[in-house]
Image (cartoon, helix red, strand yellow):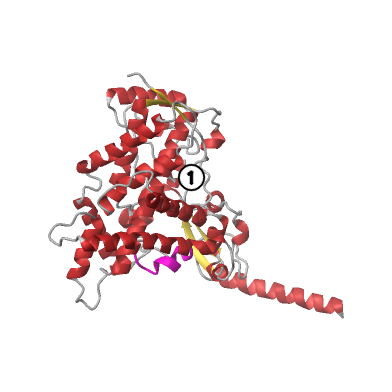
Amino acid sequence: MEITCISILILVCIFLYSCWDTLYRRRNLPPGPTPLPLIGTLLHIRRGELVNSLMKLWDQYGSVYTLYFGPRPVVVLCGYDAVKEALIDHDEEFGARCPLPVLERFAKGYGITLSNGERWKLTRSFTVKTLKSFGFGKKSIEWKIQTEAQCIVDEFRKSNGQPFDPHKKIMEAIANVLCSIIFGDRFEYKDERFAKLLEFVDDSFQLTSSTWGQLHSILPILMDHFPGPHQRIAQIAEEMVEFIYERVKANLETLDPSSPRHFIDSFLIKLDEEKSKPYTIFNLRNLLVTTQNLIIAGTETVSTTLRYGLLILLKYPDVQAKLHEEIDQGTEIYPLLCTVHRDPKQFSSPWKFNPNHFLDESGNFKKNDALMAFSAGKRICPGKNMACMELFIFLTTILQNFKLTSPTEITDADIAPRMKGFLNAPITYKLSCLPRQI
């Protein structure tokens, strides 16, 4: 009797799997690993290594393949050709952004990052136009960036050549540039409110990129009801919104509709102008979420890239020496990274640090269309010019003043991207800043 029950159970499982497999194949989607009921292709994702797992499947299934996050099919695009075709050649069809469950609980369609349709178009258009009016990505903002770059040099100099972790100091400097545009003024680095704001930013990325955050994106229905640190992501975002709301209330008391001082002023003026309309994207919630999106995106991404740049220069002192020489002559070099850069059709050594990817035979800068550090098409980062300017000024100012060394040997494994989640953060490291005599 027991053997009969087991046999029936096995036959039922085989039947269910066969039905599932047949249904899966009838969807006429790109190739990919066969999903299992309920969990999809979760077994093909290594814990804490979402991006590495996706890169491995690229080798196995090609540049366009299908995964299943639970019962939900996801088509993955890899490499320059596939990404360019989607984001640039067919930007209208691929301009929307799918919900990200781990963040959607907070955003609920507001802001500039996860919104879609008319709300996204209007929010993005207003945001880009307003930020540009306050110098975002223009020459007029350079003096603010240079001010923070000099502040970070002063902070580095306080180390007296002793090793230290540059993470916090870099974040403070990058965030202050953005705060000066959004709030109208910068924070002192010792300001407790400023420290709390940066803690929100750091915690958001750490939790979203964690194994818990990745599981929440893959199995949202299950993880919504499962206890764990991922439950704090929405809470942290709301606490950050409360911080912003306090600044908004303070600005209302001194607001002059004829003379906006910063991004929040401009949004509040527009909000007042459209308050009688039955539907408008200019409401308080959209202001708060959009501002939160800008601070998150404009702080962590640039500071992480700059930290990676310094880490790479510790590994390659010969390249650092060449950069010192170039800086002393005034030549601009922009080292930028992106997963698209792993395409062997576009880069001769996509898995190695190789500045020659962006230099011609004479050693001068050479444009490469495969460089997509800021995405492309309609979803290209509105802060691209600003970020490039920040990276160049901060990196150049630091190298003008210091030779960078480390008490520990930096290996190839140390500078290899971790690719664990939404942000490829470098390892924690310590550097010594030795004053240069120019």
Residue at 43% x, 43% y: name it.
Answer: 304
Number of numbered discs on residues: 1
Rendered view: 207 above or below 337: below
Residue 49 shown in magenta: no
Residue 107 shown in magenta: yes
Residue 130 lies left or right of residue 62; in this view the side is left
Q: Answer whether residue 233 is visible to the viewer in this image.
A: yes
Rendered view: 287 above or below 136: below
**Residue at far left of view:** 258
Q: From which residue to which does the magenta span run?
A: 99-111
Residue at 39% x, 29% y: name it.
Answer: 157
Residue 395 lies left or right of residue 56; in this view the side is left
- Which quadrant of the structure image shows residue 35? bottom right
- Which quadrant of the structure image shows residue 281? bottom left
Look at mark 1 in the image and give the residue it sits on: 425
> Between residues 382 and 148, which one lies in front from this camera angle?
148
Q: Position of residue 378 (x, y in %)?
A: 31, 57
Judge the density around disc 1: few (<14), some (14-19), many (≥20) Cα neighbours within 10 Å. many
Residue at 20% x, 42% y: name it.
Answer: 140
Residue at 45% x, 46% y: name it.
Answer: 339
Q: Answer whether residue 345 is visible to the viewer in this image.
A: no
> Between residues 174 and 89, which one lies in front from this camera angle?
174
Q: Position of residue 408 (x, y in %)?
A: 55, 29
Q: Tell me the quarter of the image containing the N terminus.
A: bottom right
Q: Position of residue 309 (x, y in %)?
A: 42, 36
